[in-house]
């Protein structure tokens, strides 16, 4: 096992298995985690530690271009999901 860099960053982890999304295509898992993160922050407050799990998952699974597009859509009020 290689030693961790001393930059203060956390080690990388893959998103854990979620039985709601058993197939290899993880698109729904990505999208649902994005929704869950923003729903959690809406309920618990911005920056709530309990919501970090969902952010870690969607950051791991979702392409950056998708997340960027969704963030833009949320800012414009055109995001199609229900948060």
Image (cartoon, grey):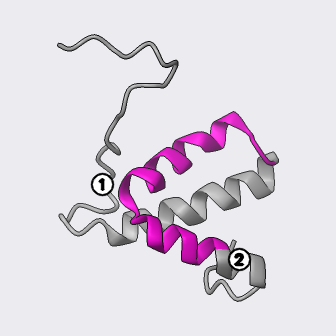
Nearer to the camera, 72 or 29: 72
Query: In what quadrant of the picture does the C terminus appear?
Result: bottom right
Q: Quadrant of residue 27?
A: bottom left
Q: Residues within 10 Å of mark 1 (few under 14, many from 20)?
A: few
In the image, 36 versus 47, the foreground residue is 47
Q: In terms of sequence position, does the residue under pointer 1 or pointer 2 come before the other? A: 1
Q: Position of residue 10 (x, y in %)?
A: 46, 25
Task: Find out whether residue 1 is within the magenta segment.
Answer: no
The answer to whether residue 77 is above or below residue 4 is below
Secondary structure beneath dot 2 equals helix
How many marks on residues? Answer: 2
Q: Which mark is residue 40?
A: none
Q: Which residues are magenta?
A: 46-71
Residue at the spot of label 1: 19
How many residues crowd mark 2 within 10 Å: few (<14), some (14–19), many (20+)? some
Label 1 to label 2: alpha-carbon separation: 28 Å
Overall secondary structure of the magenta section = helix
Residue occupied by mark 2: 74
Looking at the image, residue 13 sits to the left or right of residue 59; the answer is left
Residue 51 appears in which quarter of the rendering? top right
């Amino acid at each position: 096992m290689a030693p961790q860099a001393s930059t203060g960053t956390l080690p990388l982890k893959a998103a854990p298995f979620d039985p709601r999304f058993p197939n290899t295509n993880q698109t729904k898992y990505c999208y649902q985690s994005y929704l869950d993160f923003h729903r959690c922050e809406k309920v618990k407050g911005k920056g709530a530690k309990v919501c970090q799990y969902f952010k870690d998952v969607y950051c791991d699974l979702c392409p950056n271009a998708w997340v960027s597009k969704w963030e833009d859509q949320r800012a414009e009020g055109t995001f199609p999901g229900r948060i």
